[in-house]
Image: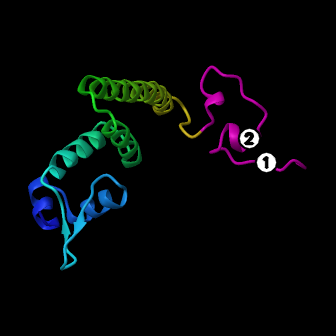
Amino acid sequence: MRIGQLAQRAGVSRDALRLYERAGLIVATRRDNGYRHYADDTIVRLLLIRTGQRLGFSLAQIAEATAGIDRIADSAEREAAVTRLLEAQLARVDEQLVELQSLRHELAERVQGGCPAAPAAHKKGHPKVALGPAINNPLKPMRSARA
C-alpha cells in the first residue's frame, strides 16, 4: 500500500511514517514510479510503535527493542522479552514518580511558605545562612556596607 493509504488506515501522518522509516522502525520498498510501498503487516508494526510511545518509550528504545524481539523465533521467549522490557519501563516510571512527588512536595511547601523563590535551605524552620540580605530577604533593600 502507498504512504497515503497507510497513513489513513493507521491514523498517523505521512511525516510520522517517514520519520519511522528513517528511524528504522518500518520498511518501505520503492516502486518504479518512486512511490513508497508498504507491506500490509506494517499496520501491526505501527500499532506496536504507537503503543510503545504511549507507554513512554522513545523511538530509539522502540527500534532497539523491536530489532531484538524480531530475532526471537519462539513466541514464549518473545513474550518473556517483551515482559522484561515492560518491567524495566515500569521501574523507570516508578523512579520518575518518586522524583515528581518530591518536586510536588517542595513546590507545595514554597507556595504555602513565606518566600517561594528563596533557596530550599532557607525555608521556615531552617537557619539562615549568611548569604547577604538580598538573598535572605530579596524584597528588603540592601544597605551599603560603609554606613
Nearest the eye: 16 or 115 = 16
Q: Residue at x 46, y 26 (%)?
A: 95
Nearest the eye: 77 or 9 = 77
Q: Which residues are magenta?
A: 118-147
Q: CA distance from mark 1 to mark 2?
A: 9 Å
Task: Determine the secondary structure under disc 2.
Answer: helix
Task: Give the residue furthest to the right.
Answer: 146
Q: Nearer the viewer, mark 1 or mark 2?
A: 2
User: Is 14 on the left or on the right of 105, as rendered?
Assistant: left
Q: Which mark is residue 143?
A: 1
Q: Which residue is mark 2?
A: 133
**Eyeballing the image, is 15 above or below 47?**
below
The prevailing secondary structure element of the residues shown in magenta is loop
Q: How many marks?
A: 2
Q: Residue at x 34, y 38 (%)?
A: 71
| Mark 1 and mark 2 residues within 8 Å of each other at the beta carbon | yes
Magenta highlight on residue 141? yes
Packing grade of label 1 (10 A; few <14, some 14-19, many >=20) is few
Magenta highlight on residue 70? no
Q: Which mark is residue 112?
A: none
- The location of residue 40, given as percent across then percent down, is 12, 53
**Eyeballing the image, is 84 above or below 147?**
above
Res 67 → quadrant = top left
Task: Give the residue furthest to the front.
Answer: 73
**Eyeballing the image, is 142 above or below 131?**
below
Q: Residue at x 27, y 58 (%)?
A: 27
Type of amino acid under label 1: Arg
Nearest the eye: 145 or 24 = 24
